[in-house]
């Protein structure tokens, strides 16, 4: 699980907007870009080309 301190400073790499953290499955959601970024072993994958639309 990502720490609350880390979640406060993380931003979407595409639009720099806020992210929502979901714990099941572990992912970060950008509602503005409509992209979801996976989190594996508490490490977010912020490669835009690997993000999935939702």
Image (cartoon, rainbow, N blue to C red):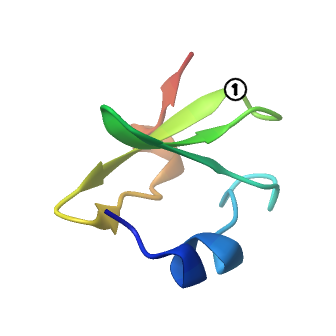
The answer to which image quadrant residue 12 occupies is bottom right
Where is residue 54 drawn, in percent x and y?
A: 57, 15
- State the quadrant of the N terminus: bottom left
53 sits to left or right of 12: left
9 sits to left or right of 22: right
41 sits to left or right of 52: left
Residue most toward the front? 4
Front residue of this view, candidates 30 and 5 = 5
Residue most toward the left? 41
Identified at 78% across, 55% down, the residue is 18
The answer to which image quadrant residue 11 occupies is bottom right
> Is 21 drawn above or below residue 1 in the view shown?
above
Front residue of this view, candidates 21 and 13 = 21
Identified at 54% across, 80% down, the residue is 6
Where is residue 10 drawn, in percent x and y?
A: 63, 71
The number of discs equals: 1
Where is residue 31 drawn, in percent x and y?
A: 76, 32
> Is 14 drawn above or below residue 3 in the view shown?
above
The answer to which image quadrant residue 38 occupies is top left
Front residue of this view, candidates 48 and 33 = 33
The residue carrying mark 1 is 34
> Is 16 drawn above or below residue 50 in the view shown?
below
Front residue of this view, candidates 1 and 45 = 1
């Amino acid at each position: 699980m990502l720490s609350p301190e880390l979640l406060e400073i993380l931003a979407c790499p595409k639009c720099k907007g806020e992210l929502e953290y979901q714990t099941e499955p572990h992912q970060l959601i950008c509602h503005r870009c409509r992209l979801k970024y996976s989190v594996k072993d508490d490490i977010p994958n912020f490669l835009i080309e690997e993000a999935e639309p939702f």
